[in-house]
């Protein structure tokens, strides 16, 4: 008998939340490109796996773009919060209790770590510690838990056995040598082992019913610009379901953001090709679950790398992006999301292969110096490129000036249309950002993996906007109602009497649309102003100097890349020949990726 592959229908609450998320994302982001969505299976059980670069916004992007209802795994800490937790319940999320959410500071200090030379057994030696009795509620020190230094060694150390002594605790072998402990000892936390059988059972039930489970196997959200080591939970769920006869498919999804913390920035959601758990690993899982999970985790990591752009740090990413922009032919005005992902990945992978060569080091130093000079002079590479392209296209300085004045005219025309809405929404944006930045500081202090905690800003801004938008819009509507009552003196009713309640009703119905289209018009004003400003500054001494330097550097970059293409370091014959292998041809969108 063939297995039924029919996907469960979306619940009303999920449908409502997906529509709300779409509107929120259209408001927060200037553009979200969705690539290769056709690869998503329309039937059967699916696990959607994404990188975690923008906290709750990641899940919102998947819900808004995926035609299937996704049951996300969410930290119980977030599930129990107001607003975020309420939304999670409406979309049918599955709460997961994480060890770090119930971690507790234990008594005493770890004074050193020892390794028995004969047996290879590793030990944590404490002073004033109570390993056998330390606990918080139902959680205590036991096998599978972890030690985390408050200020000391890096990483979490896994406990290998239940404690038999208050001052000596057996640990799993240290992967990077014996950890060092500060003089005088180190205070520590216990991350207890959590039994996740209930969570795994719920996931298996969803998949057995042809559901879609969403998860971010990196664990917590971060802003490092590359994948963190993945957690094994996703492999246990996938292989466990497959071993029970559920033909689950895994779909990697890359979530790439351009200044994720900024309002009206851009994003790309790229769906990868679905793949099943290899039958060999399903069989191996029954005998050697740890080994099978490790192999599948490596496969998943590589699949996620295929749909994301990974760079070691922000500075390196900036250099790679500048190299790509300098090599980009002048006739290509903007890139679509598809082109951007294809080109960026090729350049990133290519440079990672050759970054230790002398030629690559020299080029990166030149680009780094160029970027520092731009930063000092408060000039952007995009401005230099805009003026360069305008000069090539229009042929004379007079026409470049006309180009700038045309954008100034657009500014003057859109200003009166966009600024009323901007005025109404400024207090909402200001307050949302203020509270988001406070949470950013707290998140950075509490995390060891975040660089600047920029990944929490967008989510917090959206969350607080969900509080302030209804509040301020209610105030605006009440003010309009009071003004209408005061201005309309018709005591007999009739048409004028209807206006007393009709005008506030119209404001209630159209204020969200008015605000949204004001934001779109403000985009026109903002980018027209940037173009006018670049044209206005083009005769500035520093601007001229950097424009000349850019032309020189552009020649160096193009020669360098062409040589690497001949050596087959980069994939593709020429810039226009590099293709995104995971996507079919589609119409080029009018508004491409900048520069």
Image: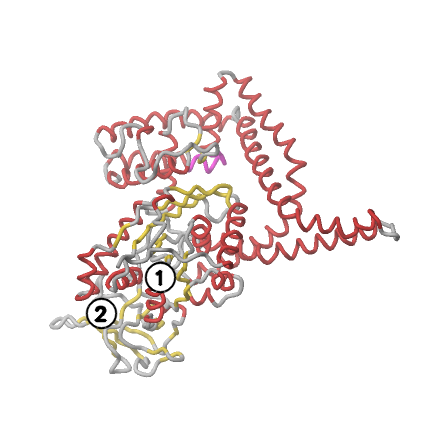
Q: Which residue is mark 2?
A: 172
Q: Position of residue 299 (x, y in %)?
A: 24, 52
Q: State which quadrant residue 371 falls in.
A: top left
Disc 2 is placed on an element classified as: loop
Q: Do tag 1 and tag 2 residues touch (Cβ < 8 Å)?
A: no
User: Magenta segment: does it hold 376?
Assistant: yes
> What secondary structure characterizes most of the magenta part?
helix
Front-lying residue, 256 or 215 = 215
Residue visible at 55% across and 17% down in the picture: 398
Please rate how many residues cluster around mark 2, counting C-alpha atoms within 10 Å: few if below 14, some from 14 to 19, many from 20. Answer: some
Q: Is residue 187 visible?
A: no
Q: Is residue 216 above or below residue 184?
A: above
Q: Is residue 255 above or below residue 387?
A: below
Judge left or right: residue 165 versus residue 523: left
Q: Position of residue 486 (x, y in %)?
A: 83, 52
Which is more N-terminal, label 2 or label 1?
2
Disc 1 is placed on an element classified as: loop
Q: Which residue is mark 1?
A: 209
Q: Position of residue 390 (x, y in %)?
A: 49, 23
Front-lying residue, 450 or 73 = 73
Q: Is residue 180 visible?
A: yes
Residues shaded magenta: 372-380
Q: State which quadrant residue 413 falls in.
A: top right
Q: State which quadrant residue 189 falls in.
A: bottom left
Q: Quadrant of the C terminus?
A: top left
Q: Is residue 190 above or below residue 551?
A: below
User: Magenta segment: does it hold 468?
Assistant: no
């Amino acid at each position: 008998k063939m297995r039924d592959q029919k996907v469960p229908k979306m619940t009303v609450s999920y449908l409502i939340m997906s529509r709300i998320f779409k509107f929120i994302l259209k408001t927060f982001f200037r553009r979200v490109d969705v690539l290769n969505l056709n690869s998503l299976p329309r039937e059967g059980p699916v696990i959607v796996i994404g990188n975690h670069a923008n906290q709750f916004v990641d899940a919102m992007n998947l819900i808004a773009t995926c035609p299937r209802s996704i049951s996300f795994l969410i930290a119980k800490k977030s599930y129990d919060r107001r607003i975020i937790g309420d939304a999670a319940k409406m979309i049918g999320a599955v709460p997961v209790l994480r060890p770090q959410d119930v971690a507790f500071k234990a008594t005493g200090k770890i004074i050193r770590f020892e390794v028995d030379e004969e047996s290879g057994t590793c030990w944590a030696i404490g002073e004033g510690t109570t390993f056998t009795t330390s606990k918080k509620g139902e959680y205590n020190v036991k096998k599978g838990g972890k030690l985390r230094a408050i200020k000391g060694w890096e990483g979490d150390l896994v406990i290998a056995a239940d404690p038999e002594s208050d001052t000596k605790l057996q640990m799993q072998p240290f992967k990077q040598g014996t950890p060092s402990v500060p003089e005088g000892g180190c205070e520590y936390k216990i991350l207890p082992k959590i039994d996740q059988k209930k969570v795994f059972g719920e996931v298996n039930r969803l998949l057995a019913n042809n559901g879609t489970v969403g998860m971010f196997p990196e664990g917590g959200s971060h802003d490092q610009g590359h994948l963190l080591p993945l957690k094994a939970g996703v492999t246990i769920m996938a292989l466990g379901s497959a071993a029970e006869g559920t033909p689950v498919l895994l779909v990697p999804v890359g979530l790439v953001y351009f200044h994720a913390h900024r309002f009206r920035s851009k994003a790309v959601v790229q769906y990868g090709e679905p793949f099943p758990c290899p039958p060999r690993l399903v069989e191996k899982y029954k005998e050697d679950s740890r080994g099978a999970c490790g192999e599948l985790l490596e496969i998943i990591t590589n699949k996620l790398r295929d749909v994301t752009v990974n760079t070691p740090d922000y500075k390196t990413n900036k250099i790679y992006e500048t190299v790509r922009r300098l090599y980009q032919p002048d006739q290509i005005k903007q890139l679509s999301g598809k082109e951007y992902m294809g080109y960026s990945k090729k350049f990133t992978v290519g440079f990672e292969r050759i970054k230790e060569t002398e030629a690559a080091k020299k080029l990166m130093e030149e680009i780094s110096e160029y970027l520092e000079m731009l930063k000092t002079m408060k000039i952007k590479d995009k401005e230099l490129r805009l003026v360069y392209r305008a000069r090539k296209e229009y042929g004379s300085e007079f026409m470049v000036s006309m180009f700038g004045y045309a954008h100034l005219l657009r500014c003057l025309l859109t200003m009166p249309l966009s600024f009323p809405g901007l005025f109404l929404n400024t207090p909402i944006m200001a307050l949302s950002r203020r509270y988001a930045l406070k949470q950013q500081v707290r998140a950075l202090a509490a995390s060891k993996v975040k660089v600047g905690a920029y990944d929490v800003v967008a989510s917090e801004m959206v969350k607080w906007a969900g509080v302030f938008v209804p509040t301020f819009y209610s105030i605006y509507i009440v003010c309009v109602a009071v003004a209408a009552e005061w201005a309309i003196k018709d005591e007999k009713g009739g048409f004028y009497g209807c206006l007393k309640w009709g005008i506030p009703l119209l404001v209630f119905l159209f204020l969200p649309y008015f605000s949204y289209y004001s934001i779109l018009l403000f985009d026109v004003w903002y980018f027209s102003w940037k173009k006018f400003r670049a044209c206005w500054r083009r005769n500035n001494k520093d601007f001229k100097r950097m424009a000349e330097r850019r032309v020189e550097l552009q020649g160096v970059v193009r020669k360098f890349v062409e040589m690497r293409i001949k050596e087959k370091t980069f994939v593709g014959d020429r810039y226009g020949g590099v293709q995104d292998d995971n996507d079919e041809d589609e119409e080029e969108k009018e508004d491409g990726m900048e520069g």
